[in-house]
């Protein structure tokens, strides 16, 4: 049994397994840290979230409604 976490990316809800959530949270955390001094940080992070949300939609379908860690690795978040 795997734990699933719901997240909001660009206004859309997605369900990620714990490993996928950890990978995505680490990626976005690194991006925010690298952009700490950038006045456009919020806009850039929102754009990243939008791009990730669009890629997540490719992995979801009728029989798949949870993003798994192996799918998250294909989002170039490592």
Image (spheres, grey):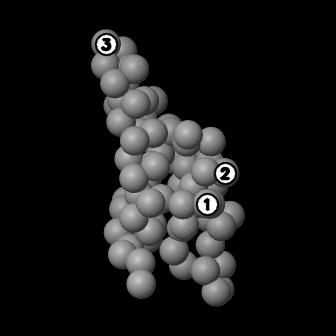
Q: Secondary structure at mark 2?
A: helix
The answer to whether residue 63 is visible is yes
The image quadrant where one finds the N terminus is bottom left
Find residue 70 and name its label: 1
Which residue lies at the image location 45% right of the left edge and 39% below the top edge? 27
| Circle nearer the viewer, 1 or 3 | 1
Q: Position of residue 36 (x, y in %)?
A: 31, 19
Quadrant position of residue 53: bottom right
Q: CA distance from mark 3 to mark 2?
A: 29 Å
Sequence-first disc among 1 and 3: 3
Q: Secondary structure at mark 3?
A: loop
Question: What residue occupies the far top of the structure in this picture?
Answer: 37
Q: Position of residue 10 (x, y in %)?
A: 44, 52
| Circle nearer the viewer, 3 or 2 | 2
Q: Residues within 10 Å of mark 2 (few under 14, many from 20)?
A: few
Which residue lies at the image location 47% right of the left edge and 59% below the top edge? 20
Q: Residues within 10 Å of mark 3 (few under 14, many from 20)?
A: few
Q: Position of residue 35 (x, y in %)?
A: 38, 20
The answer to whether residue 11 is visible is no
72 over 47 or under it: above or below: below
CB under 8 Å between discs 3 and 2: no
Find residue 37 and name its label: 3
The image quadrant where one finds the C terminus is top right
Q: Residues within 10 Å of mark 1 (few under 14, many from 20)?
A: few
CB under 8 Å between discs 2 and 1: yes
| Circle nearer the viewer, 2 or 1 | 1
Sequence-first disc among 3 and 2: 3
Left or right placement of residue 68 versus residue 44 in this view: right
Find residue 74 and name its label: 2
């Amino acid at each position: 049994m795997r734990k699933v976490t719901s997240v909001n990316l660009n206004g859309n809800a997605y369900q990620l397994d714990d490993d996928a959530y950890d990978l995505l949270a680490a990626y976005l955390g690194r991006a925010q840290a690298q952009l700490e001094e950038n006045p456009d940080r919020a806009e850039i992070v929102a754009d990243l979230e939008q791009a990730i949300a669009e890629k997540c939609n490719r992995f979801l379908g009728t029989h798949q409604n949870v993003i798994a860690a192996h799918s998250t690795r294909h989002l170039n978040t490592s």
